Image (cartoon, rainbow, N blue to C red):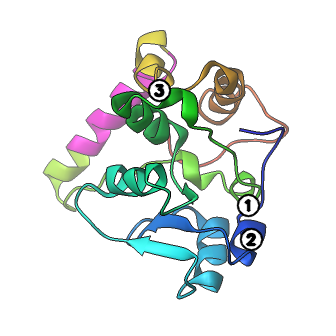
Amino acid sequence: GGPGPVSLERLLADPAIRIGVAADRSYGPALDAVLEKYRGRRNLVVFSRQRLFSDLFAMVKAGRLDGVLGMPMEAWYHAARSGVADQVACQPLKEARQDRGEWFGYVACSRTEWGRQVIARIDAVLEKERKTTRYRSFFERWLKKGLLKSYRDRYDALFLHTGLGGSSSGPGP
């Protein structure tokens, strides 16, 4: 990546730049709003397939897309599997910096006693494990070294409440 976040709005305003996105994926409120504004334009390719990110990544490799919206670990994983890790760059998006929601995942269960018990067990495991090196390594192994410090700072602030210029809120990872 480059020196700092780039604007998805600016990228999509350029009709020569083709960006691929998943049809049924939310990228957070700020990015979703930009995508909705450009939906239907030829340079925003909305994709819906079973092997979604790998297919979008293959389109980038083939020169049919200039970029794909996704998490850095998705890109590093597919780049490593394709033998092109040295040819891939990840760039943070300015609009995503407004959303803390892109860091949160959710688990859904039936609204029954069983579902409440499952959620309680998951919450307990996350509360215990999210601060361990082992837990963090599952995700961090897909990040390039240059992203690791920034990722760890944000992770600590959001999930371990160490502060990042504000308080964290929302569910755990």
Question: Which of the two discs, 1 and 3, labels the residue nearer the N terminus?
Answer: 1
At 71% from the left and 53% from the top, the residue drawn is: 93
Mark 1 lies on a secondary structure that is helix
Residue 24 vertical placement versus 171 (above, below): below
Magenta-colored stretch includes residue 120? yes
Give the label on residue 142, or none: 3
Rate crowding at label 2 as few (under 14), some (14 to 19) or many (20 or more) other CA atoms within 10 Å: some
Magenta-colored stretch includes residue 14? no
Residue 173 visible in the snapshot: no
- Front label number (1 vs 3): 3
Question: Which of the two discs, 2 and 3, labels the residue nearer the N terminus?
Answer: 2
Q: Position of residue 91 (x, y in %)?
A: 68, 44
In whole angstroms, how far apart are the C-alphas of marks 2 and 1? 8 Å
Mark 3 lies on a secondary structure that is loop
At 84% from the left and 38% from the top, the residue drawn is: 3
Rate crowding at label 3 as few (under 14), some (14 to 19) or many (20 or more) other CA atoms within 10 Å: some
The residue where tag 1 is placed is 95
Bounds of the magenta segment: 118-131
Badge 2 vs badge 1, beta-carbon distance below 8 Å: yes
Residue 17 vertical placement versus 157 (above, below): below
- Disc 3 marks a residue whose amino acid type is Trp
